[in-house]
Image (cartoon, helix red, strand yellow):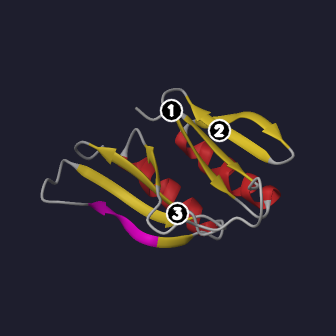
Amino acid sequence: MLNGARYGTNDIEKAKVFYDEIAKIAGAQRVFERPDVVAYKGAEGGMFLIGKPFEGAASSGNGTQVTMAMQSRAMVDAVYAKALEMGGTCEGAPGVRGNDPNGFYGAYFRDLDGNKLVAFRFGPPD
């Protein structure tokens, strides 16, 4: 159903440094860039954009979240660790959510502008 997502930033250069590192781990790459926006895409899935708002300052939404599917739990852990290393903040350490130990494994974090993301994998441990 969804084909993409976009978050706002107040500092495109800092956002690019942050998301370039996340993209490397997630197997994604920049697919286009303009002075006001940059877009990332993996081999599968939709496109993720981070850019300056059309009007006013960027702010994080209450209740909004972008999800990123990973190929392994190790990738979930690595994305989360890199996000925190780059100045992101923890919203929920990596771990199984729910009763199924082979189900949803996710890690929640916020980027440099306070936007919430989750890196996740469905399935048994690697």
Provide the residue span drawn in magenta.
91-96
Using the image, determine if residue 64 lies above or below residue 19.
below
Location of the N terminus by quadrant is top left
Of all residues shown, which one is farthest toward the right? 35
- Amino acid found under the numbered disc labelled 1: Asn
Mark 1 or 2: in front is 1
Taking the magenta stretch, the answer to whether it contains residue 95 is: yes
Q: Are marks 3 and 2 in contact (CB under 8 Å)?
A: no
Query: Could you say where residue 45 lies in the image, as x and y percent from the top left?
Result: 48, 31
- Crowding at mark 2 (Cα within 10 Å: few <14, some 14-19, many 20+): many
Q: Nearer the viewer, mark 3 or mark 2?
A: 2
Q: Secondary structure at mark 2?
A: strand
Image point 44% across, 71% down: which residue? 91
| Local secondary structure at mark 1 | loop
Residue 79 drawn at (x, y percent): 52, 54
The secondary structure type at the circle numbered 3 is: helix
Marks 1 and 3, the one that precedes in the sequence: 1
Q: How many neighbours does mark 1 have within 10 angstroms: few (below 14), some (14-19), or many (20 or more)?
A: few
Three-letter residue code for mark 3 = Ala
* Residue 93 percent location from the top left of the image: 39, 68
Looking at the rendered structure, which numbered label has been put on residue 3?
Answer: 1
Image mark for residue 40: 2
**Which of the two discs, 3 and 2, labels the residue nearer the N terminus?**
2
